[in-house]
Image (cartoon, rainbow, N blue to C red):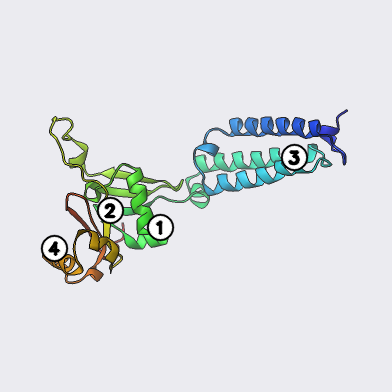
């Protein structure tokens, strides 16, 4: 009668269905007890918890001969450990630094810190994509861009761009459109340059702005209005 709980080599289909309902309800209860933190972000601790819980409680759904008591007890212990570590992280700053990543500044005062991008293993194209997802296509408007501990990139705009906008003043503004990368880590992106000009034209433009060659520039973009953004290559200062 209780084969769905203790397990059986010949567990009928309805037994698997009952197990699925029980396990789903059990995981739902664990997540509710742990709080929204476990589902709002995927940090290292949360990732480990999700993988282990999925493996422990997923096996009984595939193998009907396994007793549910063991996996349920193991899942409860793992949830307890996870909750305990989370509580310790909240109460002990030193311990928090061990299990949680510190935020990484990727852009400071409008300059992309390419060494920090490398440390975070983020390509320039991926970084620009995240900025666009933050509704920030004009790099000149950005003061800080920070890689948060949950893996998301947050953007802080310069104060001048946080104030009155053309929309507030009911002034029509030209769309800046999509920015194209002309120089990536000192290398000219020929395909993108050909869309707006020539390599000779590009070299003239960077010389006008005080650079002798593209290798001095980490990132250079141009938007559809013809405005440039340049982030030079320079060693990061400690901060």
Helix, strand or loop at mark 2? strand
Circles 2, 1 touching at the beta carbon (< 8 Å): no
Q: Residue furthest toward the front?
A: 195
The image shows residue 7, relative to residue 1, as above or below, that is below
CA separation, marks 3 and 1?
A: 38 Å
Secondary structure category for the residue under label 3 = helix
Give the Cα distance between marks 2 and 3: 50 Å
Given residues 223 and 123, the one toward you in this image is 223
* Residue visible at 49% across and 41% down in the picture: 41
Q: Is residue 230 left or right of residue 107?
A: left
Q: Are marks 3 and 4 in contact (CB under 8 Å)?
A: no
Residue at disc 1, secondary structure: loop
Q: Position of residue 225 (x, y in %)?
A: 17, 49
User: Where residue 143 sits in the image (x, y, percent)?
Assistant: 25, 48
For marks 4 and 2, give the CA distance.
Answer: 20 Å
Q: Is residue 78 visible?
A: yes
Tell whether label 1 touches label 4 (CB within 8 Å). Answer: no
Q: Which quadrant of the structure image shows residue 237?
A: bottom left
Residue 61 is marked as 3
At label 1, counting other C-alpha atoms closer than 10 Å, the crowd grade (few under 14, some 14-19, many 20 or more) is some
Quick one: quadrant of the N terminus? top right
Residue shown at 82% from the left, 39% from the top: 67
In the rendering, which numbered label is found on residue 122? Answer: 1
Nearest to N terminus: mark 3 or mark 4: 3
Q: Quadrant of residue 25?
A: top right
Residue at mark 2: 108
Horizontal arrangement in the rendering, residue 163 relative to residue 107 (left or right):
left
The residue that disc 4 covers is 209
First in residue order: circle 3 vs circle 1:
3
First reached walking from the N terminus: tag 2 or tag 3 = 3
């Amino acid at each position: 009668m209780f084969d769905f709980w203790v397990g059986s080599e010949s567990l009928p289909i309805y037994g698997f269905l009952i197990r699925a309902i029980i396990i789903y309800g059990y995981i739902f209860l664990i997540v509710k007890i742990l709080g929204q933190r476990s589902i709002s972000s995927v940090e290292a601790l949360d990732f480990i918890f999700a993988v282990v819980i999925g493996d422990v409680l997923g096996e009984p759904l595939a193998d009907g001969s396994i007793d549910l008591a063991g996996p349920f007890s193991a899942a409860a212990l793992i949830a307890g450990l996870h909750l305990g570590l989370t509580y310790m992280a909240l109460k002990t700053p030193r311990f928090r630094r061990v299990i949680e990543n510190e935020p990484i500044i990727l852009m400071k005062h409008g300059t992309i810190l390419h060494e920090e991008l490398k440390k975070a293993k983020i390509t320039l194209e991926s970084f620009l994509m995240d900025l666009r997802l933050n509704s920030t296509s004009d790099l000149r408007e950005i003061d800080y861009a920070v890689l948060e501990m949950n893996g998301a990139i947050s953007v802080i705009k310069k104060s001048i761009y946080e104030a009155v906008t053309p929309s507030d003043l009911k002034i029509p503004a030209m769309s800046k459109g999509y920015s194209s990368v002309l120089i990536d880590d000192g290398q000219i992106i020929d395909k993108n340059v050909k869309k707006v000009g020539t390599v000779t034209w590009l070299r003239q433009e960077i010389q006008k702005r005080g650079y002798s060659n593209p290798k001095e520039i980490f990132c250079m973009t141009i938007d559809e209005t013809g405005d440039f953004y340049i982030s030079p290559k320079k060693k990061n200062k400690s901060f």
